[in-house]
Image (tube, grey):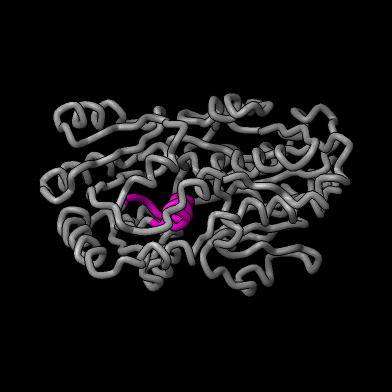
Amino acid sequence: MSINIKQSNTKTLTRLFNIAFRVDASLNIGSGHVMRCLTLATAIRKAANVNITFFCRDAIGNSNENIIQSGFELVRMAPPKSTIDLKNYSSWLGTSIDDDCEEFLQLTAEKNYDLIVIDHYAIDTRWHNKVKSITKKIMVIDDLANRKHNCDLLLDQTYQCPTVKYAHLVNNHTKLLLGSNFALLRPEFLEFQKVSNDKKEHTLLIMFGGTDPDNLTLQVLALVIKLKYIEKINVILNKTAKNVKSVFDFAQLHEKVSLYISPNNVAEIMSTATLAVGAAGTTSWERCALGLPAVVIVQADNQQEIANALQLAEVIRFISIAEIECKLIKEVEFWQNRLKLDKDVYKNCINICDGKGSIRVVNEVLKIIK
């Protein structure tokens, strides 16, 4: 299935537009922020004549290689100077916000941008104000709503995200793109979207984002491998994941386990599954677009709201990390029984996210930069 941005937008964009992305990835904070920015950058590049540069800290477990392989210019920022505390979002830069902004400005070499896109929990209006002199527009990707933003466009792809969430955090002129209708997914998630839920082989997908620092993949594998009605188990991990070797060793011992390390056909692999076990966050929208229900393990406080909403919508069942041993198998069996009775579960998922969010976001980006 091909995806085309509206021609009315692309025809007017004849000159070269400069866009910068400020985003990080690491073993600690994961790769989700970079991956959704890559999705957006790729979609913009298909729709317009643009020069796109990523500015990323050279942290352990970064996604710099993914950025380069995607054909984008990468400017490496200095490695983090301070320890990152996952519960303290202001520490996620690995330096002070002033130092980060100063380094960014130095690395831009006095270049002017039509748009700067920021996807970072540690960056707020103080950073935005300092870069206003080198950019015409600013876009922010967020979901925490815990700090102020001085931006022209704000994207929060959280399911059922209300306008009031950002009422006192943005300017009057800020255009808000809220809800899973704007979820940034690659075109392949439309191509492999299920039209029915009639698969005969019971295939389980295990996918905890890119790095899986808590090694939840192996914990889950050790439990579900005992389930005889699960005929096949597909595992997706990034090659930068800390525990790749232990998962690889496990897969070697069990014929029905297939391990995919940094595959290029993620949507295709996901589409073969009848049920998933994984994390909240960006992968939630990927699963929904493919009509794939899941058992979700909540790993952070900011995932709780998403998990609650998706469970109420009957597309996931969620548990905490501490409940894996005692509840995981019960929740897998819940879905096993539910899927036998309800062949339309996939429709609930697609109603959450239809996979066309990237098209909608790019159209809004083109409106503000032309």
* Residue 134 in the image: above or below residue 301: above
293 and 303: which one is in front? 293
Residue shown at the point (57%, 46%) measured from the top left: 1
Q: Residue at x 77, y 65 (%)?
A: 171
Residue 337, located in which quarter of the rendered image?
bottom left
Give how far across and how far down residue 341 sits, in percent: 24, 69
The residues colored magenta run: 276-291
- The x, y position of residue 322, in whole percent, is 23, 55
Where does the image place residue 21, in percent across and percent down from the top left?
Answer: 68, 39
Give x and y (percent) for residue 251. Answer: 21, 31
219 vs 349: above or below: above
Note whether residue 210 is visible: yes
Depicted 83 relative to depicted 361: above or below: above
Residue occupying image coordinates x 52% and y 37%: 25
Quarter occupied by residue 280: bottom left
Please name the residue shown 66% across and 40% down the image: 41
The answer to if 290 sits in the magenta stretch is yes
